[in-house]
Image (cartoon, helix red, strand yellow):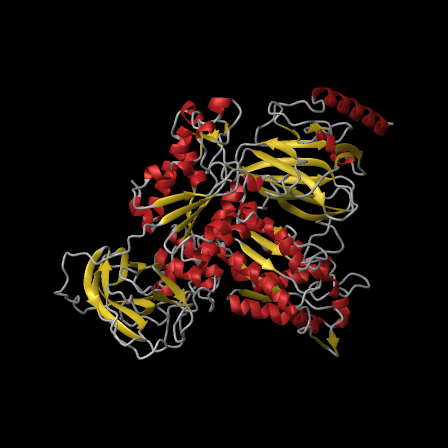
């Protein structure tokens, strides 16, 4: 009887609450914390009711973007899980999202699904949770909000499944829109999550790894998926999601091989190696710590009393990639076999699902997670202000390794992350031995020069550090290859053997052709400047040598070397200033210069070479001025007078440079990085661009038009791949590429100018980092500049001030302001044409 009265009371309360918080009505809730109950039935206490017909509007602050593609459905759970909404259209890039206005910051989002077989959750255009299985599954994730709004949907997990959502709980964690330090996991069904997370009989080791991780140091994001192979993980969106958020200090554990060896996935071992290497290289470039994990074998891999599975799952290839890329290896294959041998075959089978020798149960997954955590203990306990393993003071029996700042015996991206933290004063290299390991160019200081060499080493761009020997009191020495130079009236060749690096410079046979290096030294003083060259002619090919525009030797000899495959050296001692210096070697005869392989700079006590023949008469130089080609969209293009007052910054950029540089504007409206290439417009530029010219590249606005297949380029995959084509194409012609992030639209919310293209800006920055390419962050420059002005002034920069509708394109006033910012950016990145900025 009492039970029945309780039910009546609950029903009355539910009715009252529905009256107080009717579906679709906005309630007075914290602007940063929300709890939504989806579906057409009663609303749970403390939640906001949302039905399939609730359309987003700014006043409400939440709702579905396309309610016509939603419907209310029942669910088999209780409370908030008693009903749900179903997404009738879906996909990570779908616009059929539930939108919530939120102040920028870091949020935790808790998701409760309705009835479904297997579904994934996407937000901000990428996957967030992979394959939530079973009815009313619950999980949560962290997400940074940078554009004032969360856009979320339930999407593909298994073909034919209903993708339903019962509840969302949103809680703000921080004003800083950056995820906490994260352990990312990529893998298959032996690593993935199973639901309910806390009680499922079957588990992946990644599901239980959080038991062994201090939550104050790391969160764990398990992006592994059942049935997945390396190619699918890279190409189907999981890797894209990780690359969007991964950062220095994070760890990425990557395990594949099991499904890759399945014939249905059609992956050869060579292809597997290429795919794994591709992912490793990209992760290393972010500064995160990369860990490759060799999968466990089968429970039945016993040979008598010995368990061994070393020949399974392309294991040797995983080991080879780890060795070649110099990243951490966790050989779970060997670790698990040792454990299984110790406990015996019967106890091993008890750790696996009934009748299944591959997939562990909860007890088995726990053992595997324990093995992984123990093997990676130094990484998993690494706080932002500590090193993984203290490096002992060197003794006669302990040899230090250049670049190994954590002292674990190998140079990995973990060292890179510690180094990065040190440079931004987030950590300290406490002892002298660490400082020596970090001083990879042996110039006596630990600075950004060493950081650059560390990055190049991890990317495979160099095979050893400039200061590869232990301290001996010798002076700093550094070699600059010909391919690192700026070449004017010459080409990079590989025809004649005997060169180092990837080629040598062949000067044109003319007066004024030159090669120019930008170098950086830690201290001012005397430096021996040595050119490695070949001269296969029968006459000397002298050149003038200038330092920072001043001629220090007007006729340095480059004598004959008998043939073009015999190399010699010619040296002079010059004075260099601390910091950046420009060294130029210019041909002074009609024969041009010799073939030049590299320039080596060595600090010395020798006196500066005297050259009594130096006069104030300048050496003849080429009269060709550099040309800057602009590749971009309608915000860059040139408009004729009939479009006034519309203008692109590219049509006025020359106003902010001297006549020593020429601009050719190839930008055109409606183009993305993708269709600009596919329509042949990049080829038009590459057919005429010359050595010493520049290619400025600004795309992003049209790349983000997801509903236009001709234009759309996914930010962390296709967009990055196309940007690389511009960079590689320009460099192949001896030109200098410069990336420019998308310019800002006029989007002003809550007294803040909004970045409408954060993913494209971040992706472009990743490309600049990975390709070692100059970049001008115009989005940040625009937003910062706009924030310093009165809104009405910024309003006048855009066509909305003229036509009332266009918040994207510039007036002539706006184009000039943006062009001025571009010129300012050119000056800041310190490239040769920077000196021509007015």
In front: 428, or 184? 184
Numbered circles on residues, count:
0
Residue at position x 76%, y 25% from top? 14
Q: Is residue 103 visible?
A: yes
In front: 504, or 501? 504
Q: Is residue 588 left or right of residue 304?
A: left
Residue found farthest to the left: 612
- Quarter of the figure that contains the N terminus: top right
In front: 430, or 745? 745
Residue at position x 60%, y 56% from top? 212
Q: Is residue 811 left or right of residue 224?
A: left
Residue found farthest to the right: 1
Residue 618, above or below 700? below
Percent position of residue 123, x then y? 62, 41
Residue 453, above or below 2? below
In front: 325, or 170? 325
Residue 123, above or below 427? above
Q: Quadrant of residue 818?
A: top left
Q: Is residue 215 visible?
A: no
Residue 303, above or below 172? below
Q: Quadrant of residue 584?
A: bottom left
Percent position of residue 834, x then y? 32, 47
Percent position of residue 265, x then y? 72, 62
- Quarter of the figure that contains the C terminus: top left
Percent position of residue 593, x then y? 29, 67
Q: Quadrant of residue 77?
A: top right
């Amino acid at each position: 009887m009492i039970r029945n009265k309780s039910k009546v009371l609950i029903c009355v309360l539910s009715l009252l609450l529905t009256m107080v918080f009717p579906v679709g009505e906005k309630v007075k809730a914290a602007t940063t914390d929300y709890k939504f109950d989806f579906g057409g039935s009663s609303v749970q206490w403390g939640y906001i009711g949302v039905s399939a017909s609730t359309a987003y509007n700014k006043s409400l602050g939440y709702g579905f973007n396309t309610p016509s593609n939603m419907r209310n459905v029942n669910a088999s759970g209780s409370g908030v899980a008693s009903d749900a909404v179903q997404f009738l259209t879906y996909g990570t890039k779908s616009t059929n999202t539930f939108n919530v206005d939120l102040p920028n910051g870091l949020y935790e989002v808790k998701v409760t699904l309705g009835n479904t077989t297997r579904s994934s959750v996407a937000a901000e255009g990428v996957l967030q949770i992979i394959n939530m299985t079973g009815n009313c599954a619950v999980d949560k994730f962290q997400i940074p909000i940078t554009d004032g709004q969360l856009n979320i949907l339930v999407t593909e997990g298994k073909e034919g499944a209903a993708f339903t959502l019962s509840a969302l709980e949103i809680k703000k964690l921080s004003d800083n829109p950056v995820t906490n330090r994260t352990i990312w996991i990529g893998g298959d069904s032996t690593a993935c999550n199973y639901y309910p997370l806390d009680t499922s009989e079957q588990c992946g080791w990644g599901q239980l790894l959080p038991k062994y991780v201090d939550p104050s140091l790391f969160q764990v994001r398990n992006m592994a998926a059942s049935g997945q192979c390396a190619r699918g993980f890279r190409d189907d969106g999981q890797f894209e999601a990780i690359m969007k958020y991964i950062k220095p200090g994070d760890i990425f554990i990557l395990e594949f091989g099991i499904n890759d060896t399945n014939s249905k996935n059609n992956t050869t071992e060579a292809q597997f190696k290429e795919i794994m290497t591709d992912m490793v290289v990209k992760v290393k470039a972010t500064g995160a710590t990369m860990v490759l994990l060799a999968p466990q074998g089968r429970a039945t891999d016993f040979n008598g009393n010995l368990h061994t599975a070393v020949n399974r799952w392309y294991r040797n290839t995983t080991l080879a990639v780890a060795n070649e890329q110099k990243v951490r290896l966790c050989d779970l294959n060997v670790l698990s076999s040792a454990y299984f041998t110790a406990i015996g075959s019967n106890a091993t089978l008890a750790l696996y699902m009934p009748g299944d020798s591959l997939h562990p149960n909860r007890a088995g997954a726990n053992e595997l997670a324990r093995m992984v955590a123990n093997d990676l203990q130094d990484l998993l306990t690494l706080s932002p202000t500590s090193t993984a393993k203290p490096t002992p003071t060197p003794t006669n029996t302990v040899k230090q390794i250049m670049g190994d700042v954590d002292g674990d015996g190998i140079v990995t991206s973990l060292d890179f992350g510690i180094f990065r933290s040190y440079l931004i004063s987030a950590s300290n290299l406490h002892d002298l031995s660490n400082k020596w390991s970090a001083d990879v160019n042996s110039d006596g200081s630990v600075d950004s020069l060493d950081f650059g060499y560390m990055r190049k080493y991890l990317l495979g761009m160099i095979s050893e550090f400039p200061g590869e020997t232990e301290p001996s009191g010798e002076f700093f020495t550094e070699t600059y290859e010909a391919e690192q130079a700026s070449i004017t009236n010459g080409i990079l060749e590989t025809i004649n053997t005997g060169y180092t690096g990837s080629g040598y410079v062949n000067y044109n046979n003319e007066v004024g052709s030159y090669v120019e290096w930008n170098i950086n030294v830690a201290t001012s003083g005397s430096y021996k400047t040595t050119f490695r060259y070949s001269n296969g002619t029968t006459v000397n090919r002298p050149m003038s040598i200038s330092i920072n525009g001043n001629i220090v030797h007007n006729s340095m000899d480059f004598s004959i070397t008998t043939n073009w495959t015999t190399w010699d050296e010619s040296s002079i001692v010059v004075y260099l200033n601390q910091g950046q210096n420009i060294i130029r070697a210019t041909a002074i005869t009609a024969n041009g210069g010799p073939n030049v392989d590299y320039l080596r700079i060595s600090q010395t006590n020798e006196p500066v070479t005297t050259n009594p023949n130096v006069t104030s008469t300048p050496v003849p130089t080429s009269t060709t001025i550099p040309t800057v080609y602009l590749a971009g969209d309608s915000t860059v293009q040139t408009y004729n007078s009939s479009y006034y007052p519309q203008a692109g910054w590219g049509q006025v950029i020359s106003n902010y440079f001297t006549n020593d540089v020429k601009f050719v504007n190839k930008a055109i409206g409606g183009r993305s990085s993708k269709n600009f290439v596919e329509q042949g417009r990049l080829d038009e530029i590459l057919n005429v661009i010359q050595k010493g010219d520049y290619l400025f590249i600004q795309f992003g606005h049209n790349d983000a038009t997801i509903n236009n297949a001709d234009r759309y380029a996914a930010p962390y995959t296709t967009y990055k791949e196309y940007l690389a084509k511009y960079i590689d194409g320009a460099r192949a012609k001896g030109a200098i590429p410069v990336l420019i992030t998308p310019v800002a639209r006029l989007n002003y919310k809550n007294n803040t100018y909004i970045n409408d293209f954060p993913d494209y800006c971040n992706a472009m920055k990743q490309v600049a980092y990975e390709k070692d390419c100059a970049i001008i962050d115009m989005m940040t420059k625009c937003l910062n500049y706009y924030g310093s002005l009165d809104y009405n002034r910024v309003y006048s920069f855009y066509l909305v001030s003229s036509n009332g509708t266009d918040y994207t394109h510039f007036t002539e006033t706006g184009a000039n302001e943006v062009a001025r910012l571009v010129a300012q950016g050119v000056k800041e990145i310190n490239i040769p044409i920077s000196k021509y900025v007015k």
